[in-house]
Amino acid sequence: MRMRVWKWLGLGLLLVVVIAIAIPVLKLLGYEQLDDADRLAQKQQYLQSLSASSSTAAQRPNIVIILLDDLGYGDVGAYGAQSIATPHIDSLAQNGMRFSHYYSPSPVCSPSRAAMLTGRYPPRTGLGHVVFPEGHFISNAQKISALNTRIPTEEIMLSDVLKAVGYNTAMVGKWHMGDVAPSLPNDFSFDSYYGGLYSNDMKPFPLYRNRDIEEAAELDQTRMNGLYTREVVEFVESQDTATPFFLYYAHNFPHEPLFSSPQQSGKSEAGLYGDVVEDIDHSVGELLAALQRKGLTENTLIIFTSDNGPWYQGSPGFNRGRKNQTWEGGQRVPFIVHWPASVGGNQLRTVPISGVDLFPTLLSVLDLPLPADRIIDGVDISPLWRGESELAERLIYYYGQSGATLDAVRDSRFKYHGRRGVRATGITKTLDLKAPMGPWLFDLAQDQQESYDVSAKYPLEMQRLQEAFEARDAEFRNNLRGWLPVK
């Protein structure tokens, strides 16, 4: 009798193990990310409606977005760096407008990039988390959890809009919104692409030209800055000055691992990290020189920023926290606008703005309508560029590393943190505990480092921002992707 019991227990345990293995395997084998056909059709209709505007393209500015990876608030001279020399980046601020309270849309890369290019906070885009190369074990785990592994094709990117109105479009650098079709750079209206499809710490790491590998893995990353510089310069020099262009230059550095060029190695006072940033500054200088040679400087709108705060190295300035965190240091990064034809030089703006503002602002500059079938979370900040007015009071929302969780909200002075798990005690190198803490209220005008909870001193402000936090959280739960009824 006892042997029979043990036999059945053994069979039962085996069955449990088989089921535990079979369920994720079946989920992985059956995984398919489906795009929204109705919204994709709306996207195409919207882009087709813009094509009539292409006749006025010649009068529009060229647009260059320079996006660095993990550059901190204090890593360039214009934002206080003492040991890293960035004269070319600093010149953009000296001859343009610098923002002291710009927030990347996420403290991690994939969600931040998706949100910046669409004007929609990370949960709206369907890409609220970092994606990994196809076949990577984390990518497989995301498939088992039914998460997207690429940005949905129904999202409308800035490149889609600019291509529709007659721009030549090019991307150089890090994509990191999926490494398979139909979510590659060329699928989102970039005429040409050259770069790495994901972070430089993800293996294998080749460089692509359009859809094909040009520099095989593993790339010698001491060459990467030079290769990227060559590409952006050649693109500018190849342009017909009668047709405006959009260049999205998304450098992989200073994300770790760090590699400097042989020419720069050992020269910075900030070690290898400084060498890498100074290499990038040289690349920016070469790009600016190419624009000058073509006579395009005056009417080229250049935006310089970072996808999130610094990781283990780099300076968040006087801000608390780093990458992966919704403390200020995780998302408050440099943001410079340089456009001699319309933006005066040596200006500073202290009003809080967000990366989601970029999409609606550039469409406003070009006098283009926003898509009507989806919520655009950003606001038009072009009046600040023109010096016409300040912005109306608005709120900035901080979505955490998961992308779908709202952590905090701020207005022009106060920042409210909802109650959540916050790193409390590191017991070992591999075990980090997160204890539930908060809610808190910080007065950023007095306490940039978010060190002192003033909720008892300002109970009405605490209540106001807590209610705004809860209302936004409820709105997203009810309409996560932000779709609007189509009239």
Image (cartoon, grey):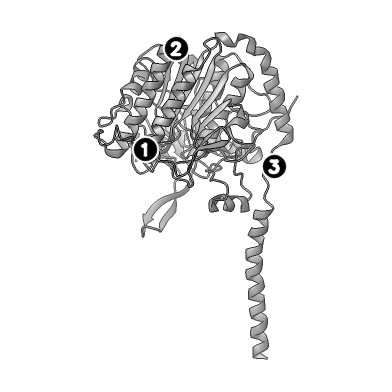
Q: Please give the label number shown on residue 294.
A: 2
Q: Position of residue 188 (x, y in %)?
A: 61, 29
Classify residue 114 by image quadrant.
top right
Q: Which mark sits nearer the N-terminus, 3 or 1?
A: 3
Work out how far the residue at label 2 is from the one at label 3, CA to CA, in angstroms. 44 Å
- The amino acid type of the residue labelled 1 equals Thr
Q: Position of residue 343 (x, y in %)?
A: 43, 12
Residue 446 in sight: no
| Residue at x-position 31% and y-position 22% | 87
Work out how far the residue at label 3 is from the one at label 1, CA to CA, in angstroms. 39 Å
Classify residue 85 by image quadrant.
top left
Q: Give left or right: position of 18 versus 409.
A: right
Q: Please give the label number shown on residue 442.
A: none
| Residue at x-position 64% and y-position 9% | 55
Residue 307 in sight: yes
Residue 422, placed above or below residue 88: below
Q: Please give the label number shown on residue 222.
A: 1
Tell me if mark 2 has few (under 14), some (14-19) or many (20+) residues whose alpha carbon lies within 10 angstroms of its own. some
Residue 71, placed above or below residue 242: below
Determine the residue located farthest toward the bottom in the rendered image.
Answer: 1
Q: Please give the label number shown on residue 34.
A: 3
Tell me if mark 1 has few (under 14), some (14-19) or many (20+) residues whose alpha carbon lies within 10 angstroms of its own. some
Q: Viewer-proximal residue, 186 or 340?
A: 186
Q: Give left or right: position of 485 versus 146.
A: right
Q: Viewer-proximal residue, 332 or 253?
A: 253
- The amino acid type of the residue labelled 3 equals Leu
Work out how far the residue at label 2 is from the one at label 1, CA to CA, in angstroms. 29 Å
- Describe the element under mark 3 as helix, strand or loop: loop
- Describe the element under mark 1 as helix, strand or loop: helix
Q: Position of residue 112 (x, y in %)?
A: 50, 35
Q: Which mark sits nearer the N-terminus, 2 or 3?
A: 3
- Describe the element under mark 2 as helix, strand or loop: loop
